[in-house]
Amino acid sequence: MSLTVVSAPGKVLLTGGYLILDREYKGLVIGTSSRFYTIIQPGDNLSKIIIHAPQFNDPNWEYKITIKDGLCELSAFEKDRCNTFIETVLKHSLSIIANRISSQKFDELILKGLNIYVIGSNDFYSQREQLKNSNLPLNTTSLRTLTPFCKVHTTLKQVHKTGLGSSAAMTTSLVAALFVYFKCVDNVNDDIKERTLIHNVSQFCHCLAQGKVGSGFDVSAAVWGSHVYKRFSPAILEPVIKSENNIDITVLNKIIDPDYKWDNQIKSFTLPPEFKMILAEVDSGSNTPSMVGKVLAWRKANPEQGTNKLWNTIASNCAIVIDNLIELTNEYEKDKTEYNEAIRTCSCVNGSTWSNLLDKERSGKRIFELLYSIFTEYQKVRQSLRDMSNMSDAPIEPPMQTRLLDACTEVPGVVMAGVPGAGGYDAIFCIGIGDKFVTQVEKVWENWNEMSVGPLLTNESSEGFKKENLENVLGLKNFLEL
Ligand SMILES: Nc1ncnc2c1ncn2[C@@H]1O[C@H](COP(=O)(O)OP(=O)(O)O)[C@@H](O)[C@H]1O
Ligand SMILES: C[C@@](O)(CCOP(=O)(O)OP(=O)(O)O)CC(=O)O
């Protein structure tokens, strides 16, 4: 039976929150090992599309599809149930596909209907309640006992997300799976043009569904994995975002074409060898209000507070962090033994003491310099984010998070600990070297009293979306009524 599986990763924006909304600045976004999976099988009903989200208590959406003047129209069987992201992707991806392949090929597949499964790794959703109901402590050992893709025992609306970017990963995996299923692409894992096409369509659908053109870093991570990101000019999508209810398919087809004038920049990236990223979701009892609007309005209204200078300072500190991380990988390539030895030395002591290793004429001096510089430059980034918090009155790194991050930074081997993306009370990341820091930081989290800190199991994985073999993804097959 023909069956298509495509997965896309979640994201963590390590540096560049707020700045990357502006094309002048870059951000470092890391792809996660937690992935979102879309499976497509032929349906057994004429032109009916069934979407299954089996992890939720409200698991299905059903649509009837019709094609009129080259455009797909969807009508929901249950009018009061909708999923904007899914509907936007189906409607527009299918319209684009119908315009790119022969109508015979398209009709053949669409008339059978589609059975689609959308399933996210456990880390996309908080598993706190689940562990509590089973009387298990909130730690990684407990999380490892959960079955992959476990039920969340609530509805999609009420689920507590962890901030890994479920909507972008879902959008991208669904777009790519549709293009693969309809054979509108041949070699999507390796062909850059095809990958660019999926990027452009996903970026358009995601912006349309969320009702605004953001920086697009989350879709970009779902497509390209970890990278240094510079956004696309929002003007690119303007003609098709403005006319939401009356999109001209000819214009849309032109804009999503891989040869169209998209000006986003992607420089691929992986954390240096022996580096590990760990994440936690935080339940502080405080909600992070929508901060983007607040910060941008403050920036615009208060040039006299030196906002441009602050933006440039953060950008230059971030650039050093990124360049040094890249140089560390080069140092590893030059001399692996020396690199591993330096990492071992630094992993046993607190980052603020790495400066003591610089005086001595010892081998690996450049590696110590780079590590210490990342440590100190990232501390400066955090200070600037706190300044931004204070001046804009948006809790980007609020004091509660500062105390927690400082405690993480004290742990030997920790290189940087911070709030990802837009910041707030919801999550933290921690990047360190060697093996020991992970257990020690997790201990800090487990014993933290001021708020409840729940680890995630995800770590860095630099791969973007990919076509998968169902057999290779543990636990995924169980959902299919094969
Ligand atoms: N498992 C899922 N099944 C179906 N839709 C999903 C699923 N996970 C996320 N979504 C879609 O993504 C939306 C969440 O988007 P958003 O609030 O922007 O979260 P995030 O920050 O994780 O991207 C949901 O309203 C839904 O439309
Ligand atoms: C402020 C931002 O630059 C980064 C926001 O990063 P998050 O990782 O917090 O993203 P969401 O999951 O969409 O809330 C806005 C942007 O770039 O779109």
Image (cartoon, rainbow, N blue to C red):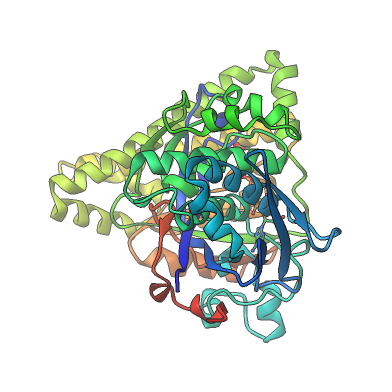
Residue 311, above or below 163: above
159 vs 444, nearest the viewer: 159
Furthest residue to the bottom? 134
Looking at the image, can residue 363 be seen? no
388 vs 181, nearest the viewer: 181
Residue placed at 65% from the left, 73% from the top? 54
Residue placed at 57% from the left, 69% from the top? 122
Q: Where in the figure is residue 25, as x and y percent of width and height?
A: 50, 26
182 vs 348, nearest the viewer: 182
Residue 77, above or below 355: below
Name the quadrant containing residue 119. Answer: bottom right
- Taking the image as shown, residue 227 lies to the left or right of residue 387, namely left
Residue placed at 53% from the left, 29% from the top? 255
Q: Where in the figure is residue 307, as x and y percent of width and height?
A: 63, 20
Name the quadrant containing residue 267. Answer: top left
Furthest residue to the front? 104
Q: Where in the figure is residue 209, as x and y percent of width and height?
A: 69, 44
Furthest residue to the right? 80
Q: Where in the figure is residue 339, as x and y percent of width and height?
A: 20, 51
| Image quadrant containing the N terminus | bottom left
